[in-house]
Structure formats: structure tokens, C-alpha cells
Amino acid sequence: MRIFFFFFFFILLSLNSLVFSLRTLSGPCKTLNPNQRALRSDQITVLINGFSESRIHLLRSIASTYASFPSVDSVLILWGNTTTPLKTLTELSNNLTFYSFGAQISVLRQSTQSLNARFFPRPSITTRAVAICDDDVEIDRESFEFAFKIWSTHQESMIGFFARSHDFDLLKKSWIYSVHYDKYSILLTKFMILNTNYLYKYSCGSGSGSDNDMKMVKLRNVVDEMMNCEDILMNFVVSSEVSSGPILVDAKKLRDHGDSRNQNGEEGERDVGLSSRRREHRKRRGDCIREFHKVLGRMPLKYSYGKVVNSVGEQGLCEKGGKLVLCDEQDL
């Protein structure tokens, strides 16, 4: 009887915790920006953006993996689909509680579907660094720890695995969204590490009602209108504070389940659809860059070059089994 009571109490406590989260996410700026010295710098908080119920199984696996990393203090799943039944999220929370080991995992149901909400500062964050992640990207432990190590020596910079770029179209005399193989100025929220302080700068500004604060309100409104580009805006925020561009880090094992190239179907038909969607995607994000520039009256994004790698081995090619492979891959 005592065991049953404890089990029932534990379930009730988990449910109450989830309901409490529902009540406290409406005012992200009520909590004062904490003193950086009071925040832990040896560990990191992982914020995973969740929305699709069809990916809950994958989300559960990814969250559990992050929780097992030694540098992770806690994992917060920010559920942005306000139409998802509470029962579904309760089951997710209970499953994570019973079957995950390591850092604590919490499921927070957002009160809004705004993409800006993924950057709300959270009272439960006690670390100086946060990792912003999508719910369909898997990263190995070694790459995660390496990225966090790089951030530890560049705490005002943004660190990530997925890079894009802004550019200026001379013919159209307009800012555009692009991809360059030799430079980048934007890191995506598929995975990025940044200082917790930037959550406050993005969501709350200085809190003084200054001209810059009013501009941030307009910029966040652009994100809501476009239903896109919150990652680009965060890059604008960070770039406005530092004199250098973001830092791209190499990952050894990285799986992006959300990449449209994973989809099945007829190759020709799929390629035509991909091409069309990519053009529309780039156009929309180019529109965001132009609007952000218009509101700010300046372009803070800065280019970076190259990628930080964990180790450099022999780059020569050797023959193995009738094939040319990197010499490092040979059996010694």
C-alpha cells in the first residue's frame, strides 16, 4: 500500500509540475536578468523546441541522449503546439521521468505558438550557457562536448554546427539570404550555443523602454508576421554585441532528420519540389533580413571564415581494398 501511495504521489507531482509550467510562461521578462557570476559556467542547459506530435518518439530519444551528457545540467522541452492534448504531454513527461537517466528533463507547454517563445528566459536556467536545439537533430556526445568547450573560451560568441549567410544583391540593391562555402554570418537554431544573457536581450531588451527596446519589439513582430526567422534575429542580437562573427564547429556524427532530402518518393518529382521550396524559403528569409535591416538602420551581421575542428589528422589518400580512402582510415 505504501509503494502504491508513493507511485501515485510521484505521478501527481509530475502532473502538477507540468500544469505549473503552463501558468508561468506568459511573462518571460518578470524575472530579472541574473548576475552572470551566479550562473554555472561548467555546465549547460539544453532547450529543445518541440511542436509535432508525430516526432515525439524521436524527441524522447534526443532529449534522453542530451540528458546523459556529463556537461548538461538540465534539459527543457519547450512544447510550442498549443493544441496538443495535456494528456499527450503528461505521458511524454512521465516516460522521460521513468526511462531517462542523467540530467533532469522537463516538459514546458508554451502559452503561445510564437517562434519568439523559444528564446524566453527561464527562471529554472542556472547555467551561463544554453544550447538551442530542434527536436529532429541528433548530435554525438563528443561533438556536443567539443562545441561547449569552444563556447567556454568564447562566451560572448555564438557557436553552432549549421551555417548560412547574408549577402547583398548588387543588381537588386537588396539584402538576401544565401549559402557560401567559404564564409558565413548566420548560425541556425538546429543547434546553437550562446550566453543566457542573450535570451534577455532578445526577449526583454534593457527593460528601460529605450529606443533599442522599441526596435526589438518591432523586430519580434516581424518574426511573428513571417512565422520564421527567429534564428536570424538572434544572430542580429548577438552580432550587435560582439566585434566578430559566429563560430562554426565541426561535428563528427550529426543526423538531421528534418532535412527534406531524407524524404522518400520519386527522385525527379522530389527534386522539383525541393527546388521550389528552397527558393521560397530563401526568399522569405531574405525578406526577414531586409526588414530587420530596415528597423535597425544598420547591418550588424559579420562574416566568419573556416570551421573549428576537434583534431587534424593525416589528410592524404591511400589505397585500401581497391579504393582510395583517407590514410587515417587504414588499419595500422
Image: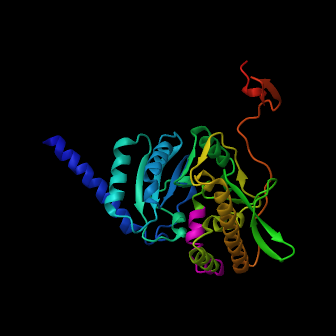
Q: Quadrant of the C terminus?
A: top right
Most foreground residue, 332 or 275: 275
Would you say residue 300 is visible in this rendering?
no
Q: Residue at x 58, y 40 (%)?
A: 140
Rendered position, 71 above or below 298: above
Furthest toward the right, the residue is 171
Most foreground residue, 150 or 110: 110
Residue 215 placement (x, y as % from top left): 64, 79
Most foreground residue, 244 or 66: 66
Give yes or no for residue 199 being in the magenta stretch. yes
How is this picture coloured?
rainbow
Is 289 displayed left or right of 174 in the figure? Answer: left
Residue 14 placement (x, y as % from top left): 31, 54
Q: Quadrant of the N terminus?
A: top left
Residue 88 placement (x, y as % from top left): 34, 58
Is 289 displayed left or right of 14 in the figure? Answer: right
Q: Which residues are magenta?
A: 198-214
Would you say residue 209 is visible in this rendering?
yes
Furthest toward the left, the residue is 1
Rendered position, 270 above or below 70: below
Residue 151 placement (x, y as % from top left): 65, 49
Q: How many marks?
A: 0
Q: Which of the 4 quarters of the picture holds residue 150? A: top right
Q: Residue at x 36, y 68 (%)?
A: 23
Is 162 displayed left or right of 118 in the figure? Answer: right
Give yes or no for residue 63 being in the magenta stretch. no
Is 95 displayed left or right of 179 in the figure? Answer: left
